[in-house]
Amino acid sequence: MLRQHPEFLESLRGEFDFGGQQAIASGDIEEGELNLDESRDGKSLFAFWTGHLVPAACGREIRGTWQLLPKDGQPARESPFVLRRVAGDRGW
């Protein structure tokens, strides 16, 4: 779940679980655009998240693209994503 970053109040931070693989993401939403950096080990960059607030969702939904950080000899991977605010909560 993404929430307000504990140290940087203008930013977001959260933890995810993808099929048993833990990840940490942090970043910003500026002028309706989301940019997150994802790490799987808490130190190195693993992937990027870029997206936009969906106007019809009244600030409750972000749609975008997740992109794996390219590595030598491996093709870049991308996948669409949708983040929705949790009902009754301030997180995504």
Image (cartoon, rainbow, N blue to C red):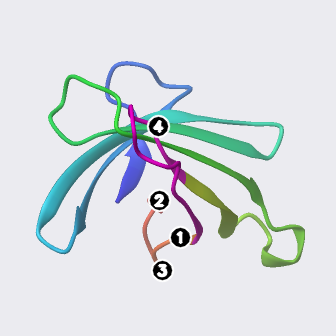
Residue type at mark 2? Arg
Q: Which residue is mark 3?
A: 87
> Pointers 2 and 1 in contact (CB under 8 A)?
yes
Residue 73 placement: quadrant: top left
Comparing 48 with 24, the one in front is 48
Q: In whole angstroms, how far apart are the C-alphas of marks 4 and 2?
A: 33 Å
Label 2 sits on a secondary structure element that is: loop
> Pointers 3 and 1 in contact (CB under 8 A)?
yes
Location of residue 58 with respect to 7 vertically, above or below:
below
Label 1 sits on a secondary structure element that is: loop
Residue type at mark 4? Pro
Which mark is nearer the camera, 4 or 1? 4
> Pointers 4 and 1 in contact (CB under 8 A)?
no
* Residue 10 rendering spot, x and y as whole percentages: 56, 26
* Residue 15 rendering spot, x and y as whole percentages: 26, 52
Residue 85 badge: 1
Label 3 sits on a secondary structure element that is: loop
Q: Which residue is mark 4?
A: 70
Q: Which residue is mark 2?
A: 90
Residue type at mark 3? Ala
State which tag comes first along the sequence, 2 or 1: 1
Q: Residue at x 64, y 58 (%)?
A: 65
Location of residue 3 with respect to 9 vertically, above or below:
below
Q: Report crowding for label 3: few under 14, some 14 to 19, many 20 or more residues within 10 A (C-alpha).
A: few
Q: Main secondary structure of the magenta part?
A: loop
Q: Report crowding for label 4: few under 14, some 14 to 19, many 20 or more residues within 10 A (C-alpha).
A: few
Q: In whole angstroms, how far apart are the C-alphas of marks 3 and 1?
A: 6 Å
Q: In whole angstroms, how far apart are the C-alphas of marks 4 and 3?
A: 35 Å
